[in-house]
């Protein structure tokens, strides 16, 4: 089987285990079905997810020019506390920003390598947790816009981390935590504006990833440095493919790369 197209983050479907799909222009691949098979991955060219041009990818699948122009790469994406659509203030495109920012958002705790706080649109639960490789997660507050979620995250970051150690996550060097207890402890630090949105009675969500064998020590595949790769797929976690030789490949981190993918 051979596939060809531009890489985008894998689509997921909640299950035991989670199902992963790579979508191409004319076809798709259920990645779970090729576990324990040899995969070949060949980099052909760049294809910016916004303009479609063969230009080096700068960040988030965009060439440098598009990254600084497209509304879907505004600073408020990574820093939701900078959201201004609730004030009617435009960053790059107010209609787009209203559409994304003025909808229910969740502040959550997720445990991928350690407990971290994060923000996502309600419609992205549990997709966001899956993308981060979290084996357990819980919602803390549900607020009506991105700004309130952002200022809540900032307040909680003083008391708990907001980063994932991706190497620990991929080697499964993780511990289970009592996220209900953590949620209750952090309630005292929620800003007054978001206090009424605290979620009092909910339980952890547990996630199961399709992994036959975890790598012992990870080495990351960069297609610009190694444009041709072959390896046996042993697992999928977060947005990473994990291979028998301890190589890991971040599909989402390689968005905008046009590749050919073969299954032997």
Image (cartoon, rainbow, N blue to C red):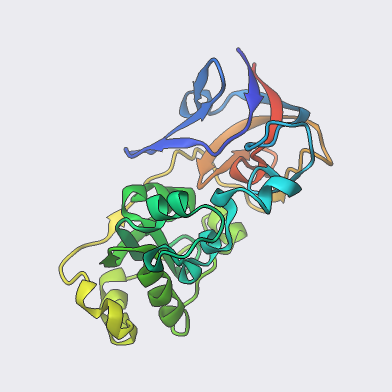
Q: In terms of depth relative to the viewer, which is nearer, 81 or 157?
A: 81
Q: Quadrant of the C terminus?
A: top right
> Where is residue 176, by image quadrant?
bottom left
Q: Is residue 207 visible?
A: no
Identified at 81% across, 40% down, the residue is 224
User: Which residue is depicted at the point 15% across and 68% down?
Assistant: 201
Q: Is residue 154 left or right of residue 240?
A: left
The N terminus: image quadrant: top right
- Residue 65, position as x, y percentages in the image: 74, 48
- Toward the right, the furthest residue is 225
Q: Is residue 191 above or below residue 39?
A: below
Considering only vertical position in the picture, is 94 above or below 191? above
The x, y position of residue 24, in whole percent, is 56, 23
Residue 196: % across, % down: 20, 77
Q: Residue at x 78, y 31 (%)?
A: 54
Q: Residue furthest left?
A: 201
Q: Position of residue 69 (x, y in %)?
A: 65, 50
Corner quadrant of residue 143: bottom left
**Drawn side of residue 205 relative to residue 120, left or right:** left
Q: Is residue 123 above or below residue 19?
A: below
Judge from the rendering whether residue 57 lies leftward or rightward of residue 164; answer left or right: right
**Residue at 41% from the left image edge and 52% from the top image edge:** 100
Name the side, left or right, on which 158 lies relative to 39. left
């Amino acid at each position: 089987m051979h596939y060809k197209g531009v890489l985008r983050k894998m689509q997921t479907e909640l299950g035991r285990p989670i199902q992963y799909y790579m979508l191409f222009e004319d076809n798709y691949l259920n990645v779970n079905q090729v576990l324990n098979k040899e995969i070949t991955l060949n980099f052909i060219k760049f294809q910016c997810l916004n303009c479609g041009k063969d230009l080096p990818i700068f960040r988030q699948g965009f060439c440098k020019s598009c990254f600084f122009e497209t509304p879907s790469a505004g600073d408020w994406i990574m820093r939701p506390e900078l959201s201004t659509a609730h004030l009617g203030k435009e960053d790059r495109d107010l209609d787009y920003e209203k559409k994304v920012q003025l909808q229910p958002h969740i502040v959550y705790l997720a445990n991928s390598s350690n407990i971290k706080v994060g923000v996502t649109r309600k419609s992205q639960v549990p997709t966001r947790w899956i993308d981060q490789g979290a084996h357990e997660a819980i919602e803390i507050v549900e607020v009506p816009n991105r700004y309130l979620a952002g200022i809540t995250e900032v307040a909680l970051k003083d008391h708990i981390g907001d980063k994932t150690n991706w190497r620990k996550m991929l080697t499964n060097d993780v511990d289970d935590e009592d996220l209900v207890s953590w949620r209750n402890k952090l309630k005292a630090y929620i800003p007054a504006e978001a206090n009424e949105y605290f979620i009092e009675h909910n339980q952890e969500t547990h996630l199961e990833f399709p992994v036959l064998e975890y790598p012992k020590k990870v080495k990351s595949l960069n297609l610009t440095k190694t444009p041709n790769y072959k390896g046996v797929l042993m697992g999928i976690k977060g947005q990473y493919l994990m291979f028998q030789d301890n190589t890991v490949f971040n599909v989402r981190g390689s968005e905008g790369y046009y590749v050919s993918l073969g299954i032997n």
